[in-house]
Image (cartoon, rainbow, N blue to C red):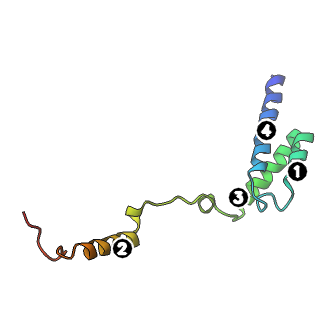
Amino acid sequence: MRNLAVLLIIGLSVYCVFDVIRSTTAERLGVHPVFWIALILVVPLIGSLAWLAVRWSRRTAGGPDQSTRYRRTTGPDDDPDFLSRLDDDRKRTDPGTSDDAPPTA
């Protein structure tokens, strides 16, 4: 059981070190990442819990939302501006077709 606790602390510390490395300056409260990594490695349990508390408080305190950080792109077929430009280009290249004319069989 003691070995399990040690493994959990090591795993938590490794997770926190990688999380510090990929975090932004605002997420680290302006503190240099070397300080956070040193704190996590010197005092693993306290440093890891401190880092998780800072990260959690930054996420719930109205910081940048994850959806703005990793914005999902939309395809061109979902963009109304693109579709209208595409329709205009089609009308310009083939003036014989019109949306008002009924389709011929």
| Callouts 4 and 2 close, C-beta under 8 Å | no
Element at label 4? helix
> Which residue in the protein does label 1 denote?
34
**Which structural element holds mark 3?**
helix
Labels 2 and 1: the sequence-earlier one: 1
In the structure shown, which secondary structural element does the residue marked by tag 2 occupy?
helix
At which x and y percent is residue 33? 84, 53
Q: Is residue 87 above or below residue 14?
A: below
Label at residue 85 = 2
Q: Please tell me whether mark 4 or mark 3 is closer to you in this view.
A: 4
Residue that lies at the very extreme toward the right in this rendered image: 42
Query: What residue appears at the point 82 percent right and 61 percent down from the top-left corner?
Result: 29
Mark 4 vs mark 3, CA separation in Å: 21 Å
Rendered location of residue 30, percent (x, y): 84, 62
- Residue designated by label 4: 14
Residue at 87% across, 39% down: 44
Residue 43 spot, x, y in % from top left? 91, 41
Residue kind at label 3, given as amino acid type? Arg
The Cα–Cα distance between marks 2 and 1, rounded to whole angstroms, is: 50 Å
Q: Mark 3 or mark 4, which is nearer the start of the sequence?
A: 4
Residue at image location 76% in from the left, 44% down from the top: 18
Dot 4 amino acid type: Val
Q: Is residue 105 visible?
A: yes
Residue receiving disc 3? 59
Q: Is residue 43 above or below residue 93?
A: above
Categorize mark 3 by other alpha carbons within 10 Å: few (<14), some (14-19), many (20+). some
The answer to the question of whether label 4 and label 3 lie on touching residues, with beta carbons closer than 8 A, is: no
Measured in 3D between alpha carbons, the distance from the residue under mark 4 to the one under mark 2, in whole angstroms, is 50 Å
**Quadrant of res 69:** bottom right
Q: Classify 10 Å Cα crowding around label 1: few (below 14), some (14-19), many (20 and above).
A: few
Residue 43 shows in this picture: no
